[in-house]
Image (cartoon, grey):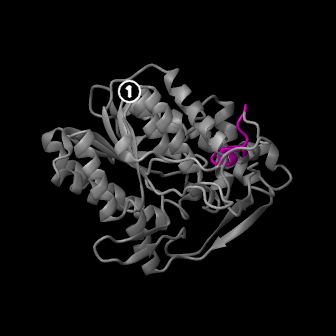
Amino acid sequence: MVIKPKIRGFICTTAHPVGCAKHVEEQVEYVKSQPKFEGPKKVLVIGSSTGYGLASRIAAAFGGGADTIGVCFEKPASDNRTATAGWYNTVAFEEMARDAGLFAATVNGDAFSDAIKAEVIDLIKEHFGQVDLVVYSLASPRRTHPKTGESFSSVIKPVGQAFTSKTVDVHSGKVSEVTIEPATEDEVKNTIAVMGGEDWEMWINALDEAGLLADNATTVAYSYIGPELTYAIYREGTIGRAKDDLEATAKRMNAKLSGRGGRALVSVNKAVVTQSSSAIPVVPLYISILFKLMKEQGLHEGCIEQMYRMYKDRLYVGAPAPTDDAGRVRLDDWEMRPEIQAAVMKAWSEIDAENLMQLSDLEGYRADFLRLFGFGIEGVDYEADVNPDLQLQAPGSAK
C-alpha cells in the first residue's frame, strides 16, 4: 500500500508505519546522544503510544536503562485502513527496546477498565515484581466508569461565560474569531470524570493493594497551565477544572506514599503539537507564535527533550524534585519566561491572515502535526509500497 496523509479536521485518518518507526528512532537517538541518568528501572507508562507518554517511555528506557510496560488503546490495520500512529509507534519502540536488551511489553485496551488494570497487574507480577515509576499520560475524550458503567465525555469549553478570541485554521491559514459558549454544570463534571485524577488514583491504589509499588516509587501525571490568553478556554475552563482535580489527587496520593519514601507529582509541561492540543480552539495559533519565538531564542523543545529533562533535571537529581509553590514540577519554565510571553502577547495583538507567516511558525506546526502520523519524516520514501499490517507482540513474549 502507498500511504498518504488524509486529514479530516484536527485528525489524520492514516498513519505511515515506516515514518512512525523513523520518528520513534529519532527520539531514541536523541536520548542516546545525551548523558545517561540514574533513574527508575521498572516503569509502567499508562498512555504510552504517542506524545508525552511515548517520550516518557523512550527516555526511561534509553536514558536510564529501564524495563517498561506500556498501556495504550490503539487500532491495528484492517481492510484498507492503516493502523493508528500509536500502534506503529509501539511496534517500533518495542523492537528497538528489545534490540537494546530491555524488557518491553504493551497491553492494548481501555486503560479505564478493571480488566486492563488486572492484566497489567498480572504482567508486573510475572516480569517485574514491583514498579518504581508509574507515568500517567492518558488523553482520552471519553471514559466509562469501571464501577458504575456510566459513560462520560469531556468538552473543551469556558466556565461561567462565553469566550471570544482569535483562532487559526491550521490547514488553510485563515485567522478568524471564535466564540465558545460556556459549559453546563454536567459538562464540567463529566470533563473532570474523564480528565481528572480519579482513574490515576484507581491505578495507584490497585497497584499498591497488589503489593506492586516499590517503597520509593514515584508516580507522575501531566498537566498544562499556559498563558493568560488561553486561561478562559484552558486553565479556567473545563480542562482546567479537571487539572485542578488531578493536582488535588496528586497531593492526596503524595501524603499516602511519602510515608515509605514514595511520591506523587504533577509535571506541568510545555505546549506541544499533539492530537489533543490541535482540537482546542485558540491553542494552535498560540503554539505557532510560541514556537517561532522559542526557536529564535534556542529554547524550543518537543516531547522527547521535555521528558529527558524531566527525568535528568527534575525527578532523579538525588534530592527532592524542584517544584513550584503548589508542589508542581515545572517543565514549562522556558515557555513561561516573561520575555517570551511578552513577545507572544505582542505578536498575538498584531497577527492576522496577512502577517501570519511572518509572526508565527505555522509551517512548523503543520510539519509537527504530520510527523505525529509518520509523514514528512526525512529519509522515508512515501512513494514506496509498504505493509501496513504490523503486529504487536503478545505481552508474555516481551523478553
Estimate the x, y position of residue 112 in percent, counting from the top left.
Answer: 36, 63
Does 330 appear above or below 244?
above
**Would residue 333 be seen by someone viewing this image from the given angle?**
no
**Which secondary structure type mostly characterizes the magenta part of the structure?**
loop
Q: Residue furthest right?
A: 354
Q: Is residue 371 magenta?
A: yes
Q: Which residue is mark 1?
A: 64
Q: Nearer the viewer, residue 1 or 212?
A: 1
In-image side of 166 versus 126 (left or right): right
Q: Is residue 377 magenta?
A: yes
Estimate the x, y position of residue 113 in percent, counting from the top left.
Answer: 34, 65
Residue at point 37% right, 38% down? 68
Residue at point 45% right, 61% down? 240
In-image side of 168 versus 396 (left or right): right
- The image quadrant that residue 399 belongs to is top left
Residue at point 73% right, 31% down? 379
Image: magenta residue range:
367-379
Estimate the x, y position of residue 262 in percent, counting from the top left.
Answer: 21, 41
Residue at point 61% right, 34% down? 300
In-image side of 259 versus 249 (left or right): left
Identify residue type, mark 1: Gly
Q: Nearer the viewer, residue 15 or 173?
A: 15
Q: Residue furthest left?
A: 259
Q: Nearer the viewer, residue 324 or 112?
A: 112
